[in-house]
Image (tube, rainbow, N blue to C red):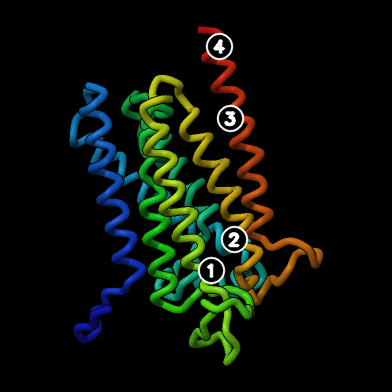
Amino acid sequence: MIKFGPVQIRWYGLMYLIGFVSSFYLVKYQLKRRRISLKSEDLENLYLFVVIGLIVGARLGYALFYNLDYYLGNPLEAFAVWHGGMSFHGGMLGAITGGFIFCRIKKIDFLMLCDMISVTVPIGLGLGRLGNFINAELFGRVADVPWAMAFPGGGPLPRHPSQLYEFFLEGVVLFSIMWIAKDRFSTRRGVLTSTFIILYGAFRVAVEFFREPDPQLGMLAGVITMGQLLSSLMILAGTAGLAISLKARARV
């Protein structure tokens, strides 16, 4: 986006920053509205743990799920985050791990905060997909629909702008659903988090039919992408979590 000598500000990094800041203040809003006392310093440190966990998890997830052979031969490249390569699924696991560790140390209700943060995550997801679109990366498969477009690096043939599909589903639609649901299920710990996991997984599986598979992997067994496989596991995990949350509520 902007370059000052060796210093570069990239669209994708800016989208991440806006997403984290938006999430932070929307969680503060939810805490205030529900009259839950949490020190501002604790919330700031929680996000620090979450951000670090997300970055580490996203990088390790990409190395493990999408390009293991390369990183086994070039292990130091796993630390070169500026070369690109981040996995949402790994990032989510890393963020959850970072948040859990902090909440365990501070003896804060982890699941309550998970529910609040999950409501805001689609903002960062949607903005991240806009960053992908601006960078002309993670584009879709060859298509003949009227809105298909050619991407630099994607050859001369027009393709699905799958980044915009993900922006709409994983960002706009998912945020709208989660924001509406937050008040109705605010007292049911784990329901919002599980709902987010299920819906994101379903939306990602759907969009992957239009998104170009990762060139180093292609289609697994010729029928499914790595993104669809990992997202299907998310749906299963979210469904199990939702069942447990609803059952625990029924016992109260």
**Earlier along the polypeptide chain: callout 3 or callout 2?**
2
- What's the residue type where badge 2 is placed? Val
The quadrant holding residue 224 is bottom right
Residue on which disc 3 sits: 241
Q: Are marks 3 and 1 in contact (CB under 8 Å)?
A: no
Viewer-nearest residue: 95 or 249: 249
Q: Residue at x 35, y 50 (%)?
A: 51
Question: How far across and how far down the image is residue 35, in percent?
Answer: 22, 21
Q: Which residue is mark 4?
A: 250
Which one is earlier in the sequence, the residue at label 4 or at label 1?
1
Q: Is 221 left or right of 13, judged from the image as shown?
A: right
How many residues crowd around disc 3 within 10 Å: few (fewer than 14), some, or many (20 or more)?
A: some
> Could you give the CA–CA distance between mark 4 and mark 1, rounded to whole angstroms?
40 Å
- Labelled disc at residue 162: 1
Q: Which residue is mark 2?
A: 207
Q: Is residue 208 left or right of residue 176?
A: right
Real-space CA distance between mark 2 and mark 1, rounded to the nearest whole angstrom: 7 Å
Residue at image point 50% right, 7% down: 252
Q: Amino acid at mark 4?
A: Ala
> Does dot 3 land on a helix, a strand or a loop?
helix
